[in-house]
Structures are given as C-alpha cells and as structure tokens.
Image (cartoon, rainbow, N blue to C red):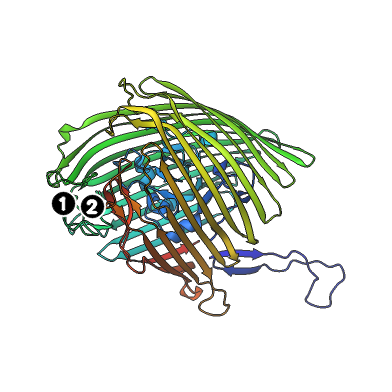
C-alpha cells in the first residue's frame, strides 16, 4: 500500500479563543490507499524525443512496471507474447534470430538493454521481467535512432526495437518490497518465485543504491516425471550518485538459469499430430531426454554519466557490456515436414556472446519566444561478437549428439555511428527531423555504410485530439549471408515506413491511439538455389502493412486499462504467395479495478481481468509456405485476479494477498513456432502471491 501524507502548514491557533493573525502547525493528515496500477507513461524514453508520449509523431508501446507485476510473466519471452503484433520464432536458442522478435511483420528485432547494449539469444529470452522498470517498443524502422539492427545476421530489425529498462537506483525515496509467488497448472506444472526490491541512501543524500533480485524454481507442465526442475537466480544492483548538475551511476546484473530442454511438438491441421512419422504427440509431449538442459549465465555492466553544462546544454556519456554463456542439448520434432526415416531433430552446442557499447551525446534546448527547439547529436560504437560450437542432426529416435562432431563458428560486427536531430515545439506543432549514419565492419574484413533519416509531425488540435504522421528509413548490410562468389554480401537492405494516426483522450488520463502503417523492405538476401544456406543475391522484397489500435490509461482514478489490437498483412513479393507467417489479427486486454468502500473489508481490493486472442497462422520452414495442412489454430485465453490488502490488525505491515486464475477455460494452444516445431502455451494455472511493502 502506498502512503500519501498531506501536511497543512498554516491555520488559526486553537485551544481557546482564536487570536487574529496567529499561525500554528496542524498535525499531518495521513491517508492510506492501495495503489492502482499505472499502465500509461508521460514520456517514452526510447523514442529519444523531448515530447510527451501522446505528442510524439511515433508510436511507442510501453509495458510498465505495474503491468509487468500484474501479469507476472516467467521471462521476457513470456511477457512479450502478450503484446499484439510482437512474435517470436519459438522459445528456443536454435533460431538464427533467437532472443529477437518479429514486429509489424518483420523479424529479428533485437533486445536493447537501457537503449544501449544489444542482448543475444539467452538474455533476450530468459531475462527475469521482475527486474525491469519497463519495456518500450518503438515501432517501425528505427535506424535513425539506434542504427540498423541486422549487422550480424542479415535483414533483421526493420519492424522496430525492443528496449528494456532495468530498475535503477532512485533518490526521491527509500522503499522496499518482497514477494512470495507460487503457481500450480493443470498437468502438474508448478512454479515458486521469491522477488525482492530495496532502494535506499548509502551515503548522505548523494549516493543511492537499489537491489532487485529474483529466485525461481519451476516444473513446466510438459516435463516428464523424475526430471530435474528448472531454476533461476538474478541479482541486479545499481548505484546512483547525484551532485550539483551531475548525475552518474552504474547498472549491473548477474543471472543464472538451468532449465530442462524443450523443442516443442509437431502439429498437423491445428492439432497435435496423431499419426505419421514421430506420432503420436499430445499437448504435453516432451521428447527431451533426462539430462538435456539449457544452462545460461549472463552478466551486464552499464556505467553512465549526465552533466548539465548550462541550463540549456546537457552532456551524456556511458556504455556497457552484455556477456553471456549458453550450453544446450535438445531433441524435438523435425523442423521440416517429418519423414519416416528421420522424424526428429537433435541439436547440441554452446556459445559465448560479448556485446559492447560506448556513446557520447549532447542535448541543447533553445527557446525563442513561442518556439522551442531541442537539438541533439552524438556518436556511438557497438560491437557484437559470438563464438561457439554446434551440431544439428535429423535422427530416427531421440538421442544425444556426440559432442565430438561439433563445428566451431564465430561472428563479429562493429558499428560506428553518428546522428543529429532537431525537435521543434511551436504552439500545437510538434515536429522532428533527424539523420544518422553508421559504418559497419564485419569479422570477415568487409565494410559497408548505411543512412537512417526520419521525419515526423504531430499537431495538438486540442489537448485531447492529436493527429500525427512520420516517415522513416533504415538500412544495414547483409553480412552473414554468402554471395554467389562464396564471400559474404556487403550491400545493404533498406526499409521505408510511412505511418499516420490519431490520438484521442476521451477522459483526462486515458488515451486511444489508432495508426496505419506500410513498410517496404528491399534488397534482402534471396537464395538462388532454394537452399537456406545459399548462395544469396540481394534481390528480396517484402511489404508489411497494417493497422494498430491501443487504449491505455485510467478510465477513472481507480480503473486502469491496457488494451491493444493489431492487424498485419505480409506480402512476399518474390514468391508471389499470400500466406499468414504469423497471426494476422491479435487482441490483448488487461484491466484492474480498485474497490473504494471505506470501513468495509473490501476497501482497497483490486480486481483484474485479462483476455488474449491470436488468429490462426501458417507454419513455414525458413519462411517458406508448407501447405494448408500445416496451420496453427487461433485461440482465446481469459484470466482473472484479485488482490486483497491484509488488515493492519494482522501485524504484517503493508501487505497484500493476491489470487489469479490464468487460462480459465484451460484452452490448449500453440503460443509460437520455429518452423514445424510448435511451442505450447501454459494450461489453466492458479497463482497465489503474498506481497510486503516497507
């Protein structure tokens, strides 16, 4: 429960006849209330614009700390599965874009920690969302902000970015919380989580520290009896130093995870395959052998500093390291159409990823009469590298691969970038014009350049009615794909987005946003042999277009809503085929309502309701359509929850008890797919949580 203290410092003296002009201090008036969840933010930092979120020419969806806590996702992949229009190619380390996400129909958007350091497969999948302050999703090509994201693997990242912000030390208050969460699913699934978060001063009022942590022990519903459960441990300390015009800090994290290996099930005509090679499959089938595990260790260190040189000029500098190690063994259904001779696919391997970043930015705000301009510019450097060993085999029966057959691989790309941008405020007008250039260098000694301009405009017709539009371009080299001469491609793909929309606030703190977009991507790698291994030429062309609708905020002071719908139409211009590579329609809704009934046991109780719909989609093998029989059915999932503040008479301090029921109707469904390998969603799940605040 949050405590609000109202202190009135003036009044007429009491205790007898009033004395004219006499002043006294009245005692504090304390009002306590269970906090209502906040799903709307005032400003989206990932857009790197000085405007309020609703005044931005660009669409940025934000999943706030309150939203993350209310949803209680198991990992980052699970959290992002709630967002319409954001998809993953299966919850696996084996995809070329593992730990990356499809946005607006275009694949491979990387996860950026604090908008700075790109994170590789394990981090982009297993990160504990309880350690995050928020997740921001800037939509469309974002090369003018971050540079193209496809430098390591090819034409990826043209649909947007996934920017996660770690909980950072704060100097405005001291606080702490602890949570015990447990869940039980149909089929025997269990999960137990311990979460903590403490923030306080270390030295006077100038040095602060925050320490979020998470521990979990879990048994997925598909795990065979007698197999070891999964476990995860995360610690994310951060320091903040504040002085006269100077702010500095360092954000760190250490995470370890040991999970049972899982590679999905085979689906035929929307149901688990009942007959044919490798059958039968059920919703809870797991082919992995007892000692097949995903072992993950990750470390991040991000120092930063901000200096107010003058009232108008601010300098920002920093950088970071994201390092992680993965070791995995899997076996699952064939990634293609199964055959009688080899209905399964086995894989094994390990890798170390090292990603680095450094930046120096300047922001200058100039006000002249009715016009305010914010000029921004800077330079940055990013290096992404990965070394490892792996092997894949089509097999007749589930089996471990001999590690003596592993082949070594190594990739590395450096990116040197510079940008300049001008943001304008004039009356109701909000406009931005920016340009970025990146120089890429691959581990094979190749080099390529890429431009990223953007322009956007929004206009406040009234404070509650704001139309907006933007056009952006992103380009990045096709590194990692061999050309017909055997050398990697060095020319660049391009993606251009045109977008327009309207924002309306029917009530003060509740905004509805509607937008339509079209993204055309050209010069992507196209195999000339039909083989996924090439050779390639830079002739690929796709178009993704659609409509998005969101409604976020407080309909009333005690009623919060997060609702979104996305429609995406994807067209592969080279194949000439029209098919649904992912759900064309998706809807998500989550709402919480706080009961305000003083002097009753229900006062402060928070009720929650959630709904999620995903349309059916076609399975593909490396993006190629496989026929009408290989289609995943659509689904709807309903959730409900209640959080009850415990009475003070129980002497537990500021505590609450919550109960949630997810997937109420026990709908069995496929949440994501890598080629023919389908990863199932959780069955009906009961969750119980006890939360303390201090």
94 in relation to 681, above or below: above
Estimate the x, y position of residue 252 in percent, counting from the top left. 44, 41
Estimate the x, y position of residue 331 in percent, counting from the top left. 20, 46
Q: Is residue 622 left or right of residue 312?
A: left
Q: Nearer the viewer, residue 121 or 484?
A: 484
Can residue 87 be seen in this snapshot?
yes
Q: Is residue 279 left or right of residue 524?
A: left
Q: Residue at x 53, y 34 (%)?
A: 473
CB contact under 8 Å: marks 2 and 1: yes
Query: Which image quadrant for residue 504?
Result: bottom right
Read off the residue under disc 1: 278
Q: Nearer the viewer, residue 387 or 639?
A: 639
68 in relation to 525, above or below: below
Q: Between marks 2 and 1, how big is the CA–CA gap?
A: 8 Å
Q: Nearer the viewer, residue 518 or 566?
A: 518
Count numbered badges in the picture: 2
| Secondary structure type for disc 1 | loop
The label number, if any, that marks residue 266 in the structure image? 2
Estimate the x, y position of residue 437 in percent, counting from the top left. 53, 27
Residue neighbourhood size for the residue with mark 1, other residues' Cα within 10 Å, grouped as few (<14), some (14–19), many (≥20): many
Q: Nearer the viewer, residue 360 or 459?
A: 459
Residue neighbourhood size for the residue with mark 2, other residues' Cα within 10 Å, grouped as few (<14), some (14–19), many (≥20): many
Q: Is residue 398 left or right of residue 435?
A: left
Q: Earlier in the sequence, mark 2 or mark 1?
A: 2
Can residue 176 be seen in this snapshot?
no
Q: Is residue 424 left or right of residue 596?
A: right
Estimate the x, y position of residue 518 in percent, counting from the top left. 51, 43
Q: Residue at x 86, y 67 (%)?
A: 21
The label number, if any, that marks residue 621 in the structure image? none
**Residue extending farthest front:** 576
| Secondary structure type for disc 2 | loop
């Amino acid at each position: 429960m949050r405590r609000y203290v109202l202190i009135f410092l003036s009044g007429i003296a009491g205790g007898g006849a009033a004395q004219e002009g006499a002043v006294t201090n009245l005692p504090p008036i304390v009002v306590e209330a269970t906090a209502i969840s906040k799903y709307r933010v005032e400003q989206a930092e990932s857009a790197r614009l000085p405007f309020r979120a609703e005044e931005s020419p660009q669409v940025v969806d934000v999943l706030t700390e309150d939203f993350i806590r209310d949803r209680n996702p198991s990992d980052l992949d699970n959290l992002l599965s709630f967002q319409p229009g954001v998809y993953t190619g299966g919850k696996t380390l084996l995809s070329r874009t593992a730990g990356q996400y499809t946005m607006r129909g275009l694949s491979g958007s990387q996860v950026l920690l604090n908008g700075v350091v790109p994170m590789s497969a394990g981090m982009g999948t297993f990160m504990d969302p309880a350690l995050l302050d928020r997740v921001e999703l800037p939509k469309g090509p974002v090369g003018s902000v971050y540079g193209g994201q496809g430098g390591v693997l090819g034409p990826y990242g043209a649909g947007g970015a996934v920017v996660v912000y770690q909980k950072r030390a704060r100097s405005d208050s001291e606080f702490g919380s602890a949570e015990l969460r447990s869940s039980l699913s149909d089929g025997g699934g269990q999960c137990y989580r311990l979460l903590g978060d403490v923030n306080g001063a270390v030295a006077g009022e100038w040095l602060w520290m925050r320490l979020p942590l998470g521990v979990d022990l879990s048994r997925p519903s598909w795990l065979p009896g007698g197999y070891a459960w999964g476990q995860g441990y995360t610690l994310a300390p951060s320091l903040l130093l504040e002085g006269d015009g100077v702010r500095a800090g360092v954000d760190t994290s250490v995470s370890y995870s040991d999970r049972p290996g899982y590679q999905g099930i085979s689906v035929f005509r929307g149901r688990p395959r009942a007959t044919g090679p490798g059958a039968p499959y059920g919703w809870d089938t797991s082919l992995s052998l007892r000692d097949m595990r995903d072992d993950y260790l990750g470390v991040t260190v991000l120092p930063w500093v901000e200096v107010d040189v003058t009232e108008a000029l601010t300098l920002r500098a920093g950088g970071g390291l994201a390092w992680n190690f993965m070791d995995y063994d899997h076996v699952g259904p064939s990634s293609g159409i199964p055959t009688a001779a080899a209905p399964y696919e086995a894989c094994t391997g390990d890798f170390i990823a090292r990603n680095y970043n450094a930046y120096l930015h300047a922001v200058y705000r100039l006000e002249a009469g009715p016009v305010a301009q914010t000029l921004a510019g800077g330079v940055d450097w990013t290096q992404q590298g990965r070394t490892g060993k792996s092997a894949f085999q089509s097999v007749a029966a589930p089996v471990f691969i001999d590690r003596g057959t592993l082949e070594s691989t190594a990739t590395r790309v450096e990116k040197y970038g510079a940008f300049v941008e001008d943001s304008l405020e004039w009356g109701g007008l909000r406009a931005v014009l920016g340009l970025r250039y990146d120089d890429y260098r691959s581990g094979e000694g190749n080099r390529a350049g890429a431009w990223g301009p953007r322009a956007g405009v929004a206009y406040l017709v009234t404070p509650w009615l704001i139309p907006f539009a933007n056009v952006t371009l992103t380009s990045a080299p096709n590194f990692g794909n061999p050309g017909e001469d055997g050398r990697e491609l060095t020319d660049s793909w391009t993606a251009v987005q045109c977008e327009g929309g309207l924002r309306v606030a029917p009530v003060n703190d509740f905004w509805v946003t509607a937008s339509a977009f079209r993204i055309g991507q050209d010069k992507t790698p196209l195999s000339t042999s039909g083989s996924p291994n090439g050779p390639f030429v830079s002739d690929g062309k796709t178009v993704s277009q659609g409509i998005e609708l969101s409604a976020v905020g407080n309909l009333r002071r005690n009623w919060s809503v997060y609702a979104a719908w996305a429609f995406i139409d994807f067209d592969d211009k080279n194949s000439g085929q029209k098919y649904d590579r992912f759900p064309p329609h998706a809807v998500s809704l989550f709402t919480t309502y706080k009961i305000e009934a003083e002097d009753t046991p229900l006062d402060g109780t928070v009720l929650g309701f959630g709904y999620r719909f995903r349309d059916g989609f076609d399975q593909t093998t490396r993006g190629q359509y496989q026929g009408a029989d290989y289609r995943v059915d659509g689904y709807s999932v309903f959730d409900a929850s209640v959080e009850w503040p415990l009475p003070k008479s129980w002497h537990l301090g500021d505590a609450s008890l919550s109960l949630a029921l997810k997937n109420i109707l026990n709908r069995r469904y496929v949440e994501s797919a890598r080629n023919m390998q389908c990863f199932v969603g959780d069955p009906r799940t009961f969750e119980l949580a006890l939360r303390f605040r201090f």
